[in-house]
Image: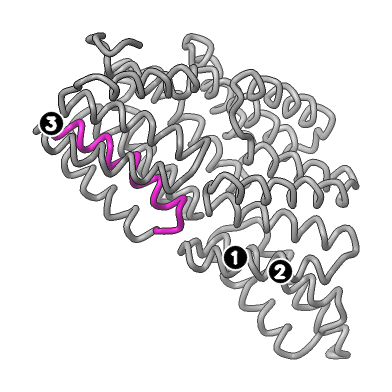
Amino acid sequence: MTAGSDSILELLPMVFAAPSEALAGAREVLDGDPTPFRASVAHHAIGMWQRDFGDLRLALRHLRLARDLAARADSADREADVLGTLGVALVHAGRTRQGLEAFERGIARGTGQTRARVLYRRAYVWWVLGRHREALEDVRRAIPVLRQVDDVIWTARAITLRATVHLALGAVDRADADFAAAELLWETTGQEHDKADAVESRGLAAFRSGDIPVALQLLDEAAEMYAKLTTPTFMLTIRRCEVLMSAGLAGEALAQADTAVGLLDGIGGQSTRKAELLLVAARAARLADDPHTAIARAAVAVRLFAAQRRTWWQTHAQLVLIEARLAAGRASGRLVADAAAVADRLAAFGSPSAPEASLLAGRIALALGWT
């Protein structure tokens, strides 16, 4: 990508096809004398790179510049596209209300294909927030429009997201079908990061189906693909830790999760991923018979999820916190009530963990002699 190229918009898909080249190309554009439109695209590309692979504070700075330059360029669709990316970054920074407001503006400003892309991004954020019904609604609105204009990359992203939501709801067969359909689409593109993400997602699906050897094989394959792109792999770490715990390697999972938290803090990365890593660390510590570490990690995760307005995640973290407190010998009538309340909330979310929470309430009651 050169400063004189007419294909400035190619910078955006390059962020997930050749991340380093996209970053260099965007900086080259800004080193010249770009129009507001071209400068908006360049700042947008840098903001995307920083959001997913670097410093979230820098991402927000570049994306706000991109938004303002798009307004100066009087391009409604350009502004809407940036607002969609900015909305994701704000939510990952824990600024959920501001992020959702950015999506509202982006959906109002965008038309056709651009609006469908913003809807997909908001669906992704609904998934991050644990609001799965809203995620499915937005992605179902986006997919027909993206297919109609033959937008292969964004159609594949939307189908992959739909599969991920199905997996979160326990619909493994639906998820498998969507992952397979998305991977066929990815093979027709040069989106190397997205391809690695698809392999990673298949690894998660294999794990949920109970095939741990295949899950580990696929996650290793995805790790090799990410390594070639020199991009961070925090989501992959979370999924690998889940598989390690199932294989009885909870201590190793705890060490990997704690290391990833340190790396994430070091680059100023996504607050949302930090909360998820802390939750995984808490689960691993509990399985490793270290209830005090589990309590410490889970308590921080609960606070972060609450600040991020991620009620679904917060409730799951509360479940782990209650389990750890029971393991530490802190059974009480209050803990019985807390477990029962968590079970009710998980049932309302349609979470597969709801029966586990109900059983936990019963176990605490029995420990107190409440037969």
Q: Dot 2: what SS? A: helix
Q: Residues in magenta?
A: 75-95
The answer for how far apart the CA atoms under marks 1 and 3 are is: 43 Å
Residue 75, disc: 3
- Whether residues under marks 1 and 2 lie with C-beta atoms below 8 angstroms apart, the answer is yes
Question: Vertically, is 167 above or below 151?
Answer: below
Q: Amino acid at mark 1?
A: Leu
Q: Quadrant of residue 287?
A: bottom right
Q: Is residue 61 left or right of residue 196?
A: left
Q: Residue at x 42, y 52 (%)?
A: 91
Quadrant of the frame with the N terminus:
top left
Q: Please report the residue visible at 27 percent of the width from the left and 42 percent of the height from the top.
A: 83
What type is the residue that disc 2 sits on? Answer: Ala
For disc 1, the neighbor class at 10 Å (few under 14, some 14 to 19, many from 20) is many
Say which residue label 2 marks. 357
Quarter assignment of residue 163: top right
Q: Position of residue 272 (x, y in %)?
A: 53, 53
Q: Is residue 269 left or right of residue 334?
A: left
Circle 1 sits on which residue? 346
Q: Relative to 7, does residue 239 appear above or below in the rendering? A: below
